[in-house]
Image (spheres, helix red, strand yellow):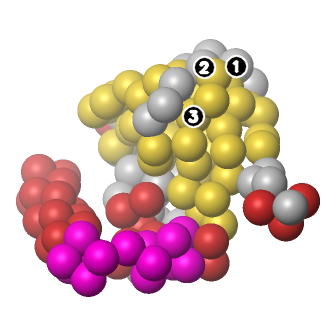
Amino acid sequence: MAKDVLERQSFSTGEVIFKKGEPPRAAYLIQAGSVNIVVGEGEEATVVGTLSAGDLLGEMALVDAQPRSATAEAKQPTTVVVITAIEFAKRLEKSDPFVRSMVRVLTRRLRNMTEASNGDS
């Protein structure tokens, strides 16, 4: 039973959970607090979204095994449940093949739109 317990991590206000370009290691389910999704750096940094309790972040990079497309930063003290890449893959593989395919297609479309809006190639 203890094997099924997922790790939790806490982040202080302003602390980076992951940075754009990093390899995917985990997805995160927000238990408490909120997280800004940021594109660009320094004066060019723009918050493109804010996630809160119950939201999942970092999943896109796990679905397509691509580097992070944005930076995630705690907007306030935040606690997350860590879903490792291995655990994520196990759960995704247990899902219906149609659902797996749909998740991959939607992830590819979202990544393409994100890259196009950021001017990435």
**Range covered by the magenta-colored residues:** 88-101
The foreground one among 63 and 44 is: 63
Decide: marks 1, 2 in contact (CB < 8 A)? yes
Q: Quadrant of the N terminus?
A: bottom right
**How far apart in space, not on screen, are marks 2 and 3 (Cα)?**
7 Å
| Disc 1 from disc 3: Cα separation | 11 Å
Which quarter of the figure has residue 119?
Answer: bottom left
Residue tagged 1? 77
**Percent position (x, y) of residue 48?**
28, 32
| Numbered circle sitting on residue 30 | 3
For the residues bearing labels 2 and 3, Cβ distance under 8 angstroms: yes
Residue depicted at 62% across the width and 71% down the height: 87
Location of the C terminus (image quadrant): bottom left
Q: Amino acid at mark 3?
A: Ile
Say which mark, if any, is on residue 33. Answer: 2
- Apparent side of residue 11 relative to residue 115 in the rendered image (left or right): right
Residue in the picture at 56% in, 42% down: 29
Q: Is residue 36 left or right of residue 107?
A: right
| Neighbour tally class for label 3: few under 14, some 14-19, many 20 plus, Cα within 10 Å | many
Residue at figure coordinates x 41%, y 67% from the top left: 61
Which amino acid, by three-letter code, is at mark 2? Answer: Gly
Q: Looking at the image, is mark 1 or mark 2 earlier in the sequence? A: 2
Front residue of 25 and 104: 104
**What type is the residue that disc 1 sits on?**
Pro
Q: CA distance from mark 1 to mark 2?
A: 6 Å
